Amino acid sequence: MVSYRVKIKSSAQKEIHKLPSKGLRNKVVDIIDSLNANPFPEGSKKIKGSNNIYRIRQGTYRIVYQVYKNELLVLIISVRHRRDVYKDL
């Protein structure tokens, strides 16, 4: 089984810390941790018009990440509310 490295951008790390509840924070961290085993879990979707950028829903929040298959790397780009997450992509 191939294992991916998961790297979180510092801006995404700050967004995780700013999430409104500890329960939501824990769920988001669990999802991110699971990406090393499977970067394309059920419910993940490719963002249209992008190269290898995907998103996972957690309630009204989105975890946006990029997958580098040749480097076996998952880079967490952003963790924000759905109304804000796509503005900077």
Image (tube, rainbow, N blue to C red):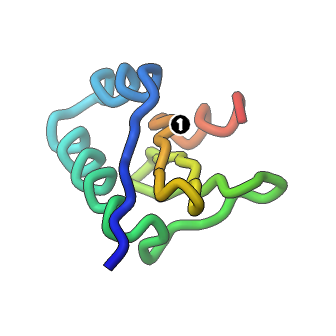
Q: Residues within 10 Å of mark 1 (few under 14, many from 20)?
A: many
Residue 54 at x, y percent in the picture = 59, 57
Residue 49 at x, y percent in the picture = 84, 54
Count of marks, rendered view: 1
Residue 6 at x, y percent in the picture = 37, 47
Residue at the front extreme of this rendering? 70
Question: Looking at the rendering, in which quadrant would you find the C terminus?
Answer: top right
Identify the residue under disc 1: 77
Image: 54 above or below 22: below
* Relative horizontal placement of residue 85, taking residue 37 as reference (left or right): right
Residue 77 at x, y percent in the picture = 53, 36
Q: Residue at x 33, y 51 (%)?
A: 32
The residue lying toward the viewer, choosing from 26 and 8, is: 8
Q: Residue at x 47, y 41 (%)?
A: 76
Mark 1 lies on a secondary structure that is: strand
Amino acid identity at mark 1 = Ile
Q: Residue at x 30, y 47 (%)?
A: 28
Question: Looking at the rendering, in which quadrant would you find the N terminus?
Answer: bottom left
The residue lying toward the viewer, choosing from 7 and 83, is: 7
